Amino acid sequence: MVGNFYNKARDQITICKAMKILLYKHPQIHFVFIGGRSESHPEIYDECFNYCLSNDLLDNVHFLGSRSDVAALLRSIDG
C-alpha cells in the first residue's frame, strides 16, 4: 500500500487487523506500507505500528516510511 499516514481515509488499521487473520492460515504473506508518519496526526501511524507490534505481525507487515523509489520498489516486490 502506498500512501502517507495522515488521515483515516486509507484505513491502514483495517489492513493490520486483517493481516492478523490472514497470517493464521497463510503465514507466508507479507504486506508493505510505503508512506510516512504525519507530524500533525502521528496517532494514525502509531496505532497501526503498535497494533502490529503487540500482535507479533512485524515479521510480515513492513513499514518502509516515505520513499522516493516507489516505482522501483513495487516492481521488485511484484510477484
Image: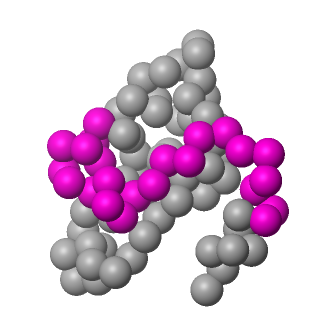
Q: Is residue 6 left or right of residue 31?
A: right
Residue placed at 49% from the left, 47% from the top?
A: 63
Q: Is residue 28 left or right of residue 74?
A: left
Residue placed at 42% from the left, 23% from the top?
A: 43
The chosen color scheme is one colour
Residue 13 location (% of width, % of height): 40, 46
Q: How many marks?
A: 0
* Nearer-the-camera pick, 30 or 3: 30
Residue 68 location (% of width, % of height): 79, 45
Q: Can residue 9 be seen?
A: no
Q: Is residue 43 left or right of residue 17?
A: right
* Nearer-the-camera pick, 39 or 67: 67
* Nearer-the-camera pick, 65 or 25: 65
Residue placed at 39% from the left, 76% from the top?
A: 29
Residue 5 location (% of width, % of height): 57, 35
User: Which range is magenta?
Assistant: 50-72
* Nearer-the-camera pick, 8 or 70: 70
Residue 52 location (% of width, % of height): 29, 48
- The residue most toward the top is 40
Quadrant where the C terminus lies? bottom right
- Asked if the magenta segment contains residue 58, the reply would be yes
Quadrant where the N terminus lies? bottom right
Residue placed at 36% from the left, 64% from the top?
A: 60
- Asked if the magenta segment contains residue 49, the reply would be no
Q: Can residue 3 be seen?
A: yes
- Placement of 44 over or under 24, stated as above or below: above
- Placement of 49 over or under 26, stated as above or below: above
- Placement of 46 over or under 52, stated as above or below: above
